[in-house]
Image (tube, rainbow, N blue to C red):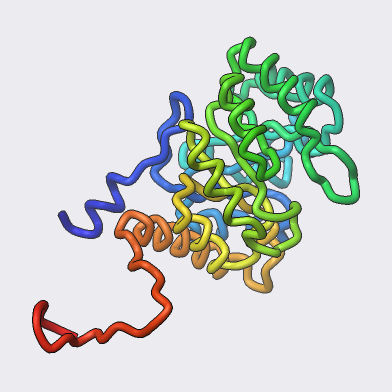
Amino acid sequence: MMYNQISMEDTLRIGPYTLHSRLILGTGKYPSPEIMEQALEASGTGMVTVAIRRVDLKNRSGDPVLGHLDTQKYKILPNTAGCYTAEEAIRVARLSRAAGFSDLIKLEVLGDPKTLLPDTTALLQATETLVKEGFVVMPYTNDDPIMAKRLADAGAACVMPLAAPIGSGQGILNTLNIRFILETVKVPVIVDAGVGTASDAAIAMELGVDGVLMNTAVAGAKDPVRMARAMGLAVEAGRLAFEAGRIPRKEYATASSPETGKIGG
């Protein structure tokens, strides 16, 4: 099988939806709508997330985000960014569906405005309610395997543990917990928040996660379009490396050109 065939066949399934890219991008903080458009195109993403509370649902064509998204090219993932209670997040999700968006929802319930860490108790409550109402729930959570399992058991279509606090750019701070989550749940695991540069995205994918969602790392870069391209390549490279299987770490050197055995150096 050729490399391009591998790329074409490597899809990510979230509930009933199939994505041909494992990179999901946000739409906030770009210097201009035009740069956002160029960055999305350069990344190769097939899904973009939109903060429902921060767009003009009554004037979509004139909105600086919605008015610049090609819905034939990108699957729109509405999110509940800025919500601090389960009730508020549920209300925003319902508003999103009533406004004509799909049953997809990226569920965020924040605990406080300083850290922007999830309120996982409220998150679980909102997940349970929205799943019962037929939503395909993608919850943003902390890197806790116990909570990840509870969310998956509640019917979440995937779990989205943070790599580091939102917008911090610190990369994967706890690879061990991400591995525990991968062992614990059967739904897709998508690293969400904290990625800073392309190597962070590659590391996440090499751990075996199913995808990466990011916004600030691209939108806040000096050149968002180039960074978007770098992130797309990093996610693809990390996935290929995970599937290929890295060599084991060893304490001492091993000759790459043995005197006997395999040919080559």
Left or right: where does residue 244 sit relative to residue 257? right
Left or right: where does residue 122 sit relative to residue 100? right
Count all numbered tags in the image, as a single digit: 0
Q: Position of residue 237 (x, y in %)?
A: 40, 63
Q: Position of residue 207 (x, y in %)?
A: 48, 55
**238 or 223, nearer to the observer:** 238
Does residue 78 appear in this view?
no
Residue at the image point whose x is 71% and y is 24% from the top: 124
Residue at the image point whose x is 81% and y is 37% from the top: 110
Residue 141 to residue 32: above or below: above
**195 or 36, nearer to the observer:** 195
Q: Quadrant of residue 199?
A: bottom right
Q: Quadrant of residue 220?
A: bottom right
Residue at the image point whose x is 42% and y is 78% from the top: 251
Q: Position of residue 9 (x, y in %)?
A: 28, 45
Q: Position of residue 226 (x, y in %)?
A: 55, 70
Does residue 116 appear in this view?
yes
Residue at the image point whose x is 76% and y is 32% from the top: 120
Residue 162 to residue 256: above or below: above
